[in-house]
């Protein structure tokens, strides 16, 4: 979404429009990149892409009346693979007229603030309400679905989805039709406190995942400010075993909604928790520490350890148990 937001916002400011399309439900296709968006501007210009361009004709025929519209794109294996997808499948695409969405939503995305959009495709009246996370992590709402009960229900669902800390889309049958709730979060920030080979490997892993990365060997007021700004989409991993560093770093991270991980033996983890208890942190808060951090992959090298740590961050944010896909029967994609 971030790639098209500046252009869409510019079109709105100039009094022009754009139909914005994004996938809200997948079945099949193998792996795909999250956050893909296609915007068709009033002058015919296309910004961004969706499904490798394979569904453009179907998508462009939707939403011409300005209402939020759902359209299904079905691709066989051959067409999907030609478009760069893993295999065939079905994608439900939501097409929205950008001018029908509160401007505050586009402005929030442009400034890197978490936001959610609730839509009622096909509604005869107002069909979009936006929610923008404030600095105090409450939600401001803009627009309406037409009645207070629907707006309140949408707000509850938006808050729940934003807490997952990742872009998401859910669809549910509600009174009056279908409710689609989408969340959009800024790029994940991984902040590592400590140094060494694992810190370097975590930086490489973050780059591969498209996350931003900050590493600092010690603790400072500047680093404390960075930690305090982190949200649910972000992560702090403490590598340092120095009590003068790991204790304040963990305490600061636990004051935010971010993922909190700590490297070290079980003895080291126990000692850290004792120091944090002495600072007044309760057991529920301490239970948020993922320590020793990382999934049990049998990692030995710094690179393998970084993979295990990144995998746990992703699994935790997704609400997954990180078991083998072979042994599960749910969706294989997040």
Image (tube, rainbow, N blue to C red):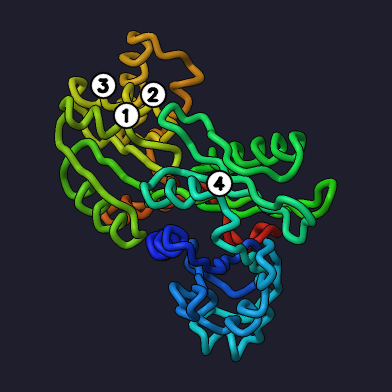
Q: Between residues 283 and 40, which one lies in front from this camera angle?
A: 40
Task: Assess whether mark 1 and mark 2 are in contact (beta carbons under 8 angstroms).
Answer: yes
Looking at marks 2 and 1 on the same chain, the residue that comes earlier in the sequence is marked by: 1
Q: Residues within 10 Å of mark 2 (few under 14, many from 20)?
A: few
Q: Is residue 214 left or right of residue 183?
A: left
Q: Position of residue 146 (x, y in %)?
A: 74, 43
Query: Could you tell me residue 163's position as x and y percent?
Result: 54, 38
Q: Nearer the viewer, mark 3 or mark 1?
A: 1
Q: Quadrant of the C terminus?
A: bottom right
Marking on residue 228:
1
Pointer 2 residue: 255
Question: 25 above or below 188?
Answer: below
Residue 70, quarter of picture:
bottom right
| Structural distance between the alpha carbons of marks 3 and 4 | 33 Å
Q: Few, some or many C-alpha atoms within 10 Å of disc 1 (few <14, some 14-19, many ≥20)?
A: some
Task: Tell me the SS state at disc 1.
Answer: helix
Mark 2 to mark 1 CA distance (whole Å):
8 Å
Question: What residue is rendered at 23% in x and 36% in y?
Answer: 193
What is the spatial separation of the Cα atoms under label 1 and label 4, in whole angstroms?
A: 22 Å
| Comparing labels 4 and 2, the label whose residue is closer to the camera | 4
- Residue 3 visible, this angle: no
Q: Distance from label 4 to label 2 (Cα)?
A: 23 Å
At x 17%, y 38%, the residue is 216
Where disc 4 sits, the SS reads strand
Q: Which residue is mark 3?
A: 248
Who is closer to the viewer here, 171 or 20? 20
N-terminal of the pair, mark 3 or mark 1, is 1
């Amino acid at each position: 979404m971030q790639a098209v937001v500046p252009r869409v916002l510019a079109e709105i400011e100039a009094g022009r429009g754009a139909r914005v399309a994004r996938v809200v439900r997948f079945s099949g296709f193998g792996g795909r990149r999250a956050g893909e968006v296609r915007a068709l501007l009033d002058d015919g210009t296309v910004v961004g892409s969706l499904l490798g361009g394979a569904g453009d004709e179907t998508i462009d025929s939707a939403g011409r009346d300005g209402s939020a519209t759902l359209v299904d794109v079905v691709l066989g294996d051959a067409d999907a693979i030609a478009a760069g997808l893993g295999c065939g499948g079905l994608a439900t695409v939501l097409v929205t007229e950008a001018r029908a969405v509160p401007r505050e939503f586009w402005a929030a995305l442009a400034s890197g603030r978490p936001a959610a959009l609730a839509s009622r495709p096909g509604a005869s009246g107002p069909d979009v309400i936006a929610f923008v996370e404030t600095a105090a992590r409450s939600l401001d709402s803009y627009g309406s679905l037409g009645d207070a009960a629907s707006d309140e229900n949408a707000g509850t669902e938006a808050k729940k989805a934003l807490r997952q800390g990742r872009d998401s889309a859910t669809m549910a049958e509600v009174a009056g039709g279908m409710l689609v709730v989408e969340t959009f979060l800024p790029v994940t920030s991984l902040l590592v406190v400590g140094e060494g080979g694992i810190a370097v490997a975590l930086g490489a892993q973050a780059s591969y995942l498209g996350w931003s990365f900050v590493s600092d060997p010690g603790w400072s007021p500047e680093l404390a400010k960075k930690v305090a700004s982190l949200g649910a989409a972000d992560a702090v991993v403490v590598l340092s075993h120095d009590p003068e560093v790991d204790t304040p770093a963990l305490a600061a991270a636990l004051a935010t909604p971010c993922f909190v991980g700590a490297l070290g033996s079980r003895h080291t983890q126990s000692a850290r928790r004792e120091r944090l208890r002495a600072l007044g942190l309760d057991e529920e808060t301490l239970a948020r520490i993922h320590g020793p951090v990382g999934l049990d992959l049998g990692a030995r090298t710094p690179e393998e350890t970084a993979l295990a740590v990144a995998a746990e961050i992703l699994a935790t944010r997704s609400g997954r148990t990180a078991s083998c896909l072979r042994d599960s029967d749910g969706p294989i994609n997040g």
